[in-house]
Image (cartoon, grey):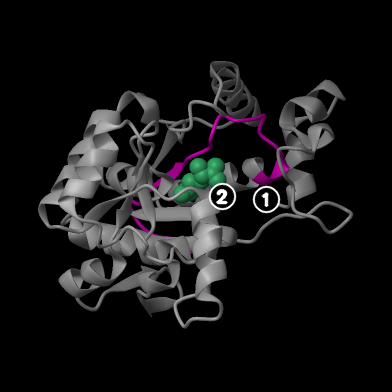
Amino acid sequence: MIVKNVVTRFAPSPSGYLHLGHAYSALFAAETAGRGLGRFLLRIEDIDKGRCKPAYEAAIYEDLAWLGLDWEQPVRRQSDHFEVYRQALTQLGYKGLIYHCFCTRKDIAAEFERAGRAPHNIAGPDGPLYPGTCRHMSDDERDFRLGRGDPFALRLNMEKACESAGLLTWQEADIGGHLATPQIFGDVVLARKDTPSSYHLSVTVDDHLQGVTLVTRGEDLRLVTHVHRLLQALLNFKAPDYTFHRMLAGDDGRRYAKRDRSLTLRGLRGAGETPGDIRRRIGI
Ligand code: GLU
């Protein structure tokens, strides 16, 4: 696929060392941009301050440079932009599309138990859909619980959001249009008391602000596009196009993951492999 003047990005989370799967994803994004004389950006997705570490971020730069990649400066680091995500949440709040949810995992499990096989008790791509317990909480109760300091999540009222956005489609390069069906995820979490943004929100805001025109990512993230397309519409962002690459698996057939220490780029480099060896291993 050659798309002219395309802007792509690689957006790793610094919660571990990069492995062969990341190398494939980064090279895929960079080469897709390169073929169309476009731009390749890097973004550090570190909103989860508990899991992300500066040492892993430093290792990302080192490993990507070793692979031979070159990206534009400045790199966007999500934890530097919580205020921007908060503003996006405020906009959604003005539209009445966000609500406070005080449910713990235990509360949600208990609600499923109580509801038995009720029709709303169905599984979404990320697990059981939120049963909506806090969706219609009174303002008084919400204020009481906030005043008491209870932890909370901010959820998107999916039904209302879909109604407000109307029918939406998104474009997959070389494939065509898909009807957006974000309802499959239910009332997604967009922020939490102690993490003021979520993956869905920050990725959508950043792809817009960075001018990304073609989102390239692994096909394990294909379905989240439905939610991102909805957020783009609600926030009046132009939608980028999407393309998904295959997921690499090791000899045992399992996908590479951060737990596979021996297949980190630095592990392989330490064992004497060259960037060319890495490319041969992953076939790019
Ligand atoms: N940060 C995500 C990850 O490391 C990928 C982000 C994206 O491409 O949307 O899996």
Of labels 1 and 2, earlier in sequence is 2
- Measured as percent of width and height from the top left, residue 7 is found at 35, 47
Q: Is residue 108 left or right of residue 194?
A: right
Q: Nearer the viewer, residue 236 or 265?
A: 236
- Measured as percent of width and height from the top left, residue 198 is found at 39, 43
Question: What span is in magenta?
Answer: 1-21
User: What's the residue type where badge 1 is placed?
Assistant: Ile
The residue labelled by disc 1 is: 284
- Measured as percent of width and height from the top left, residue 254 is found at 80, 55
Residue at 74% across, 49% down:
282
User: What's the residue type where badge 2 is placed?
Assistant: Phe
Magenta segment: does it hold 99? Answer: no
Q: Nearer the viewer, residue 189 or 281?
A: 189
Bin the neighbour count of mark 2 within 10 Å (Cα to Cα): few under 14, some 14-19, many 20 and up: many
Q: Is residue 85 left or right of residue 114?
A: left
- Residue 264, compared with residue 282, is above or below; it is above
Identify the disc placed on residue 28. 2
| Mark 1 element type | loop
Q: Quadrant of residue 95?
A: bottom left
The answer as to whether callout 2 falls within 8 Å of ligand 1 is no
